């Protein structure tokens, strides 16, 4: 087994590769956090200046010869104080170097560190690649999670499609009901406009995103993969060859072909109708 092969440092290949993955995941999270920190440090002063400029402009344009209402003035003052306090706290945390992990480190440096970590991971995996039989067996063990992912996405699109359809049904029925109930149309005109807008948007969204077709394709792919996985476990056709290696190779090839077909169907759904006909 690959996890039992020792490397030069006394550990295992599997542990070494897992550690690389953990380091990469940690760097990705640090990059996200650092981007939020930088956005806060530079965005908060910009919002503060914008708030002050909006307040001054409102005073000049609307209340040049009169007093600004206390409610409006309080909104501008409180917003400015909150933004000023937030800006001060963020700059303190940045330059104190005690709270934020990557204080003083640019996002570019973290991106470079992530790129180097990914390159080291690739080189390490390439130099310690297990035999193809072990890789194929590991691939088979990862398939249950892939099936779960496909079915979760299928349920998501199916629920989205049902929600859109119910909204479409209710809005379409409400248009007729409101039209028949109110005569003259006021004050129902605004209701009719909103309902008509909802019907138009939902119809366009269903036609563009095609959640029902996406749910069907995902569920079909998950069922096909599960069917082949069951056939492999039971040793029935087409995985009844005497050589286990041959069965593993055929199984991995078949599943990858199904996943490629699924990606192609997703791409076809993302294209306009004319582009889909050309692809087909």
Image (cartoon, rainbow, N blue to C red):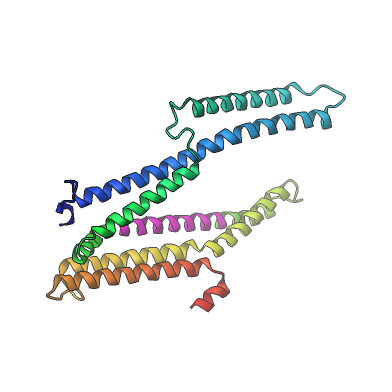
Which residue is nearer to you in this view: 183 or 262? Answer: 262
267 on left or right of 220: right
Give me the residue at 65% from left, 34% from top.
Answer: 46
Q: Residue 166: x percent and y percent?
A: 52, 55
Q: Quadrant of residue 28?
A: top left
Where 110 sits versus 268, above or below?
above
Q: Determine which quarter of the picture holds residue 82.
A: top right
Q: Quadrant of the N terminus?
A: bottom left
Residue in view at x 32 percent, y 56 percent: 122
**In-image side of 88 versus 48 (left or right):** left
Dominant SS in magenta = helix
Magenta residue span: 146-168
Q: Nearer the viewer, residue 200 or 72?
A: 72
On screen, residue 69 above or below 179 = above
At which x and y percent is residue 36? 51, 38
Eyeballing the image, is 266 above or below 12?
A: below
Residue 216 among magenta residues: no
Indicate the quadrant where residue 255 lies.
Answer: bottom left
Furthest toward the front, the residue is 8
**Image check: 118 left or right of 3?**
right
Q: Is residue 151 magenta?
A: yes
Q: Toward the viewer: 170 or 126?
A: 126
């Amino acid at each position: 087994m690959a996890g039992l092969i020792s490397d030069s440092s006394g550990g295992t290949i599997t542990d070494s590769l897992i550690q690389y993955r953990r380091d990469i995941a940690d760097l990705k999270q640090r990059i996200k956090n650092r981007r939020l920190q930088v956005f806060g440090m530079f965005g908060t002063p910009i919002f503060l200046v914008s708030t002050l400029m909006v307040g001054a402009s409102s005073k000049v344009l609307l209340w040049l010869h009169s007093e600004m209402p206390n409610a409006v003035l309080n909104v501008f003052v409180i917003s400015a104080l909150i933004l000023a306090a937030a800006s001060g706290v963020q700059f303190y945390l940045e330059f104190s170097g005690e709270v934020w992990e990557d204080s003083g480190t640019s996002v570019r440096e973290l991106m470079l560190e992530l790129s180097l970590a990914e390159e080291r991971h690739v080189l390490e995996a390439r130099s310690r690649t297990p035999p193809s039989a072990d890789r194929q067996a590991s691939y088979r063990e990862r398939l249950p999670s892939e099936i779960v992912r496909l079915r979760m996405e299928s349920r998501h699109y199916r629920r989205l499609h049902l929600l859109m359809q119910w909204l479409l049904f209710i809005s379409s029925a409400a248009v007729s009901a409101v039209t028949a109930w109110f005569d003259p149309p006021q004050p129902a005109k605004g209701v009719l406009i909103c309902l008509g807008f909802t019907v138009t948007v939902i119809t366009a969204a269903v036609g563009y995103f095609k959640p029902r077709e996406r749910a069907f394709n995902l569920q079909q792919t998950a069922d096909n993969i599960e069917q082949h996985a069951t056939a492999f476990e039971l040793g029935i056709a087409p995985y009844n060859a005497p050589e286990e290696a041959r069965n593993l190779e055929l199984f991995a090839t078949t599943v990858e072909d199904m996943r490629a077909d699924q990606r192609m169907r997703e791409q076809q759904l993302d294209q306009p109708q004319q582009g889909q006909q050309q692809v087909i």
